[in-house]
């Protein structure tokens, strides 16, 4: 393992020798200089992990050097050492970015502990920086793939939102259309990228626990609340909270979320103090909120408050021209992950992929490419490499059909129930295929199956 390199900037030869000797015994690599100008030269020529900087130097004082080093080497910790300490100089050093300020004479053990803390803190900062850069690359605008006119409009809107001060966005679309990707992109392409991105699937928790997760709770708020806890809104201050499946929250929590959206304040569960935060809320749903509002399952005022900037993602079956682009994107991704050399798909395979209706949308396509590349080791994905459901199912084709109303009229729900029963009979009970025959999503069909007691 490479030794961490410390730059020791000290003009007193005996002190410099003593410190360098002890630091070397502790396992550090030490570069020694006695002037500020030599320190700047060493920083340009060597990889330095920490600076031990004396306050008084022959050519400049430590604060002058710190003013130069700080902006240029932002993640480099600096520990100031001085025998001429004043409160003002200590404050100035910390303002300029010094990690700590030690008065001479100091115990060497105190210095070693301070060095260790500084290096650990810097390591964590660098790791966080690498993570953020990886997230920005993963969710950057370059990962928005598509040329379909509707999806291009969505991408343009995402760019505008990311660059704006908009604080509430609603993403709507079927499951698997990429709502989570867009939520991340809005965050990491914005000036909020250095702040937290917190996400929560609202349907995954019971309402009481969901409220605690969002707003936090005070100690003793309920039986298991042994200590106070911050919620996602508080933890994400300055950043973004992604609320997936927002349509699943209950009426009591809906009113509290509405209040929060109105003034960006809330109380922890069991608390009495209003807490104000600055967060962008990106909500997502695959449910029909208009229908939920009309049925009284979702508050109208909350719906319109969420719908300040609505984005509707089209299903993949409505943008077949994007399938080749997405296939290439996922092949490139899994080539890197699996260290493979797949170059693409044959014409026949691509045609089958473009004709398939993708009930699971982009998520289903990504999972399919991953499965094929795990099981096969070919340069070109061919028709026999695709799973059976791609090859045997007919593509979804909306058909314009005119039904003649009988003279005595009909009960519309009876007609709908009959068509659903016919579709299920024709597909042998396969709900995905039946939904496709009816021009519905699988979730919508399941809702109607429940409605007509056909489950």
Image (cartoon, rainbow, N blue to C red):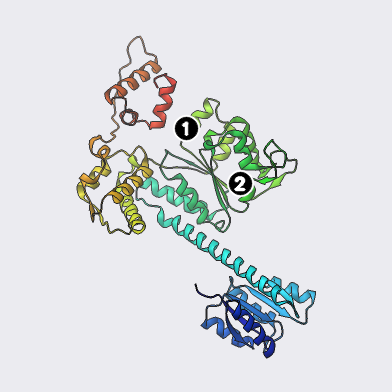
Q: Which structural element holds mark 2?
A: helix
Q: In the image, residue 261 lies at what x, y percent?
A: 62, 42
The residue at the point 29 percent across, 51 percent down is 373
The quadrant where residue 97 appears = bottom right
Quadrant of the rendering where the C terminus is positioned = top left
The residue at the point 63 percent across, 45 percent down is 231
Q: Residue furthest right?
A: 86
Q: In the image, residue 308 lies at what x, y percent?
A: 55, 42
Q: Is residue 322 above or below residue 66?
A: above
For mark 1, does the 10 Å Cα neighbourhood hold few (<14), some (14 to 19), or many (20 or more) residues? few
Residue 353 or residue 108, whichever sits in front: 108
Q: Is residue 423 left or right of residue 55?
A: left
Residues marked 2 and 1 touching at CB (< 8 Å): no
Q: In this rendering, which labeled residue sits more in front, label 2 or label 1?
A: 2
The residue at the point 43 percent across, 22 percent down is 450
Q: Is residue 131 above or below residue 365?
A: below
Residue 287 or residue 273, whichever sits in front: 273
């Amino acid at each position: 393992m490479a030794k961490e390199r410390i730059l020791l900037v000290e003009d007193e030869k005996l002190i410099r020798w003593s410190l360098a000797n002890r630091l070397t015994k502790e396992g550090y690599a030490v570069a020694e200089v006695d002037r500020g100008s030599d320190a700047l030269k060493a920083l340009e020529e060597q990889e330095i992990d920490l600076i031990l900087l004396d306050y008084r130097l022959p050519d400049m004082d430590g604060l002058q050097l710190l003013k130069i080093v700080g902006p240029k080497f932002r993640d480099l910790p600096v520990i100031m050492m001085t025998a001429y300490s004043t409160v003002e100089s200590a404050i100035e050093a910390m303002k300029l970015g010094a990690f700590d300020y030690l008065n001479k004479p100091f115990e060497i053990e105190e210095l070693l502990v301070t060095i260790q803390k500084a290096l650990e803190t810097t390591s964590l900062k660098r790791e966080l920086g690498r993570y953020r850069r990886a997230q920005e690359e993963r969710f950057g605008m370059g990962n928005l793939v598509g040329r379909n006119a509707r999806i291009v409009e969505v991408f343009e809107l995402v760019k505008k939102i990311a660059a704006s001060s908009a604080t509430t966005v609603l993403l709507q679309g079927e499951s698997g259309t990429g709502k989570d990707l867009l939520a991340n992109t809005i965050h990491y392409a914005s000036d909020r990228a250095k702040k937290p991105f917190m996400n929560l699937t609202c349907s995954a928790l019971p309402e009481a626990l969901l409220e605690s997760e969002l707003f936090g709770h005070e100690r003793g708020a309920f039986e298991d609340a042994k200590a106070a806890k911050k919620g996602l809104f508080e933890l994400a201050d300055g950043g973004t909270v992604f609320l997936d499946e927002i349509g699943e929250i209950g009426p009591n929590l809906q009113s509290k979320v509405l209040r929060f959206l109105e003034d960006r304040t809330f109380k922890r569960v069991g608390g009495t103090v209003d807490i104000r935060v600055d967060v962008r809320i990106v909500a997502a749903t695959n449910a029909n909120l208009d229908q939920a509002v009309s049925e009284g399952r979702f508050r109208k005022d909350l719906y319109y408050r969420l719908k300040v900037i609505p984005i509707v993602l089209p299903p993949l079956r409505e943008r077949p021209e994007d399938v080749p682009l997405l296939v290439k994107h996922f092949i490139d991704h899994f080539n890197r992950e699996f260290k493979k050399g797949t170059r693409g798909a044959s014409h026949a395979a691509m045609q089958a992929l473009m004709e398939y209706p993708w009930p699971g949308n982009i998520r289903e396509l990504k999972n399919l490419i991953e499965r094929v590349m795990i099981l096969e080791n070919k340069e070109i994905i061919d028709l026999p490499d695709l799973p059976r459901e791609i090859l045997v199912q007919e593509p979804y084709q909306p058909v314009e059909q005119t039904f003649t109303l009988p003279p005595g009229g009909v009960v519309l729900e009876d007609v709908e129930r009959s068509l659903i029963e016919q579709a299920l009979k024709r597909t042998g009970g396969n709900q995905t295929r039946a939904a496709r025959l009816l021009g519905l999503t699988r979730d919508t069909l399941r809702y109607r199956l429940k409605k007509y007691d056909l489950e």
